[in-house]
Amino acid sequence: MNEMSIITLTTDWGTKDYYLASLKGTILKQIPDANIIDVSHEITPFDLSEASYILRNSWKNFPEGTVHIIGISSEASPDHPHLLIKEKGQFFIGADSGLFCLLFDETPTEIYELDVIQSSDKFTFSTKDVFVNVAKHIVQGKDLNILGERIPELTKRTAFQPVVDPDVIKGKIIYIDHYQNVVTNISESLFKEVFGRKKFQILVNAGQYKITQIHSSYGDVGEGELVALFGTDNLLEIAQNRGRAAGLLGLELDDVVRIEVKE
Amino acid sequence: MNEMSIITLTTDWGTKDYYLASLKGTILKQIPDANIIDVSHEITPFDLSEASYILRNSWKNFPEGTVHIIGISSEASPDHPHLLIKEKGQFFIGADSGLFCLLFDETPTEIYELDVIQSSDKFTFSTKDVFVNVAKHIVQGKDLNILGERIPELTKRTAFQPVVDPDVIKGKIIYIDHYQNVVTNISESLFKEVFGRKKFQILVNAGQYKITQIHSSYGDVGEGELVALFGTDNLLEIAQNRGRAAGLLGLELDDVVRIEVKE
Amino acid sequence: MNEMSIITLTTDWGTKDYYLASLKGTILKQIPDANIIDVSHEITPFDLSEASYILRNSWKNFPEGTVHIIGISSEASPDHPHLLIKEKGQFFIGADSGLFCLLFDETPTEIYELDVIQSSDKFTFSTKDVFVNVAKHIVQGKDLNILGERIPELTKRTAFQPVVDPDVIKGKIIYIDHYQNVVTNISESLFKEVFGRKKFQILVNAGQYKITQIHSSYGDVGEGELVALFGTDNLLEIAQNRGRAAGLLGLELDDVVRIEVKE
C-alpha cells in the first residue's frame, strides 16, 4: 500500500460540475493506484495569489513523491507554458502563469517546460488531457527529461511585501479564512526583526482597533475578544475568539494592517 | 492495487449532512477495497436533467469496472423501479426515474430490474440499504442475473432538442457552470450540419448580444469579451473570458439561444 | 487492500482553506495506507451539537478499526483535555468539549486522556500535530495505554430532551438538512411509548400546521404536501415531499414541535 501514488488537485472549478469527475476518472484510468486528494476546488476563479497561498501552506505536509496538479488558468500560451517542477522530492504540474514563483522559498532547481502532445483535440481541458499524462509518466518513474526542456527560471510575479520603516511595519490582508480570521503578509521573522522586545501596537481598520499583544492560541483571550497570533503559515493573523473578525471589523482583502512601536 | 473497486457517487444530498458519510461507511464495510469517488453532491434537489448532464459528461472517463451509484430521487416505485445497467464495461445503479435514458447515446443492452431485499426496514435510504449490496455483488464478479430480471427498455424522458429550420437553430440553455459559462443543447455536429461554411451569428438574450465566430479556447478573445466555443461535452457554450457570462448577460436556464445565417 | 486504515475527518473548517489539505498530507505522510473519508467539514463553526448529530448518525456504519478524527474546538485545555475513545471497535480522537458524550448511547468503557507531545511548537493546530500521531499509533496496533491515562467519564453536556406530559410530547427542532427537512429530538420509541395506538396530531409552528399521520417515505404523500416520518436516525422528521419544509413553514433550529392526543 505504500506504493499508492498520491495525486493532489488544486483548482478553481468548484465541485458541482462534471469537470472534476472527468479529471478524476481520467486519472484513475491512467494511474489505477492513484490516491486522489483534493487540496481545494474553491479558489476564487483565476485568483493565482489565493491558489498559491493555499498550496504554499499545504504541500510541505505531503510525503515525497506526491504529484500536485494545478488546474487554475491552466491553458498554455507562449508566455505561460506548461511546466513540471520537482522540488524537495515532490512534483508540481501547471501553467507558468505566475503562481509557481509564489509557491517556493527559492527557485526550484528542476524546472521542465513541457512538450507533451495532448490526448484530445479540444483546447479547453489541458488539466485532464495533458497534466494527467505527465503525472503518469512521473509515477512510473520515467526520465523527466523526456517531457521537455529544462529551463532556469519561473515567470516572476511579485507578492506585495510589507513596507518597513524604523519602528513601523505596514502590511496588508492577503487572505480571509473560513472563520473570517484575517491573514496578513507580515511574517513572524519580520515582526521579530523590527520590534524585538519593544512594545508595539497593531492597528486595524485605520486604527479603529488596536491589539498590543501576540498570543499563541485563539483561546488565550475571552470569547468574542480580538486576538493576534502567528498561524501555522508563520504570518500575522487577526482573529476574534469564536467570532468572525473580518465581518465584525469590516475588513477586506488588501486592507492595510499597521504595526508601530508603542511609546 | 489495480484491483481497487472504483465506486462513484452522484447525489443531490450536499456534503454537510450525515447521509453521505453513512453511505461511505456502509460501502467500506461491504467493500473494504472500495475507492470512493465523488462525482457531485451539489445537484439541485430532484433535478434529473442536471444530474444526467453531469454524469453523462464524466462517466466515459472512468475505467472499465467502475460502479456508478446515483442517489437522486432514488426511492423505488412501480413506475420507477431500481435498475442496474451495464454499459461499455461500467455499471450504473439507481431508480429509473428518467435519468438513465439521458445518460447513454443508445439504449444499453444490459438492463436489470433489481429485485433485492434491502438491509433496513426504513424506506428512506435505498441508496445505502439497497444499492451498496448491489455494488458489492458486482465487484465480487457474481452473476448479474441473480439481481433481477433483464428488461429491454428504460423510462423515456425526452431532452428538449433544438428546433432546426433552414439556416436557423433555436436551442436553449441547459446548464450554467461554476464560472457562469452557459451551456446550450446545440451540439457541434448539428451546428456543422446546418451552417457548414456559411457565415452565422449567435443571438443571445433576444438578440441583445451577437457572436459571429466559434473559437477553440476562452483565451482566444480579450479579457472580458464574449466567446463561443464547443466544450468537451461537444455542446455550444457561451462564455466571457475570465468573466461570468450568465450574470453579465442576465442569462438563465431554459433561455433561448438562436443561431442564424448572417447575410 | 483490506488492510487500508480508514481515517474519517469531521471539522468546522470548510474545504477551501489550506487546513484540510495540510491535515490530509500529514496523515498520508504518517500513515501511507490511510483511506481518508470526509464525514463533514461544513459543521457550523464551534457547533458541537451539530457535529455530534452528524457523527452520531454516521459512525456506526463504518467498519471496525475506523479512526474518527474530530477537528472542532480541538484545542486542549485543563477542562477539555484531548481524548482517545475506543467504542465498538472504532476509535475517536478529539477534545473533550462535550461533544463525545452526545455520540454514544452509553459511556464508553475505554477512554484515554491523551498525554502526547505535539510535533509543532504552534498551539493552533492540534488536529494535525497531535491527533495524527495518535491515529498512527492506533493503526500500528500499539498499546493504547501508552498514549495516556484511562479515565472513567466524559464531560457531560446535556442534550435538550423532549418534555413529556400525559398524552403530550413537546420537543424541538435540532437539525435542518440540505433539503430543509426538519429533524426533531423526538425519538420513535418515545413516540410509541406515549401514543401507542392513540390518534395524535403534530403541531408545527405554534399549531399553524398539523400532521396527523406518520408515513414511512417522503413519496407517500403528494408533491408539495407535508409529511412526518422517522428517519434513519430514528427521530421524528417533518418534511415536504420534494419541497423545502423549513423555508416553507418558517421553521428554525430550536423551534418547538408539539405532539398531542387528538380527541
Image: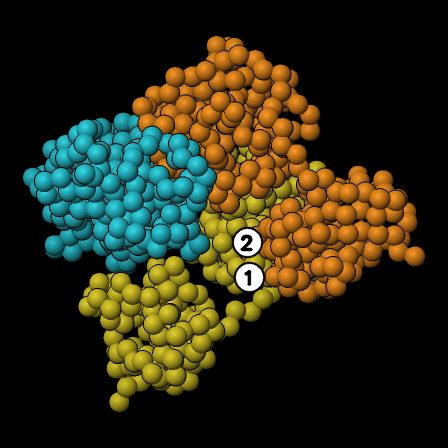
Chain colours: A cyan, B yellow, C orange
N-terminal of the pair, mark 2 or mark 1, is 2
Residue A255: give x, y in percent of width and height: 25, 53
Q: Nearer the viewer, residue B214 or C25?
A: C25
Indicate the quadrant where residue B232 lies. bottom left
Indicate the quadrant where residue C130 lies. top left
Instruction: Look at label 2 and name its amino acid.
Output: Asp
Determine the residue located farthest toward the bottom in the rendered image.
B263
Q: Which residue is drawn at 31% across and 38% down?
A: A228
Q: Residue at x 11, y 33 (%)?
A: A109
Q: Which residue is drawn at 70% across and 48% down?
A: C172
Neighbours of disc 2 within 10 Å: few (<14), some (14-19), many (20+) = many
Mark 2, residue position: B12
Is A76 placed above or below C24 here? below
Determine the residue located farthest toward the right in the rendered image.
C263
Q: Is residue A240 visible?
A: yes
Residue C185: give x, y in percent of width and height: 70, 43
Numbered disc 2: what chain?
B
Kindly report the distance in space between the C-alpha atoms of the residues bearing marks 2 and 1.
8 Å
Mark 1, residue position: B47
Determine the residue located farthest toward the left in the rendered image.
A152
Instruction: Look at label 1 and name its amino acid.
Output: Asp
Residue C24: give x, y in percent of width and height: 39, 33
Is B253 placed above or below C195 here? below
Numbered disc 1: what chain?
B
Left or right placement of residue B34 versus residue C53 in this view: left
Viewport quadrant of the N terminus of chain A:
top left
Badges 2 and 1, same chain? yes
Question: Marks 2 and 1: CB-CB under 8 Å?
Answer: yes
Count every numbered label the image shows and give the total. Answer: 2
Residue B219: give x, y in percent of width and height: 22, 63
Left or right placement of residue B79 versus residue B94 in this view: right
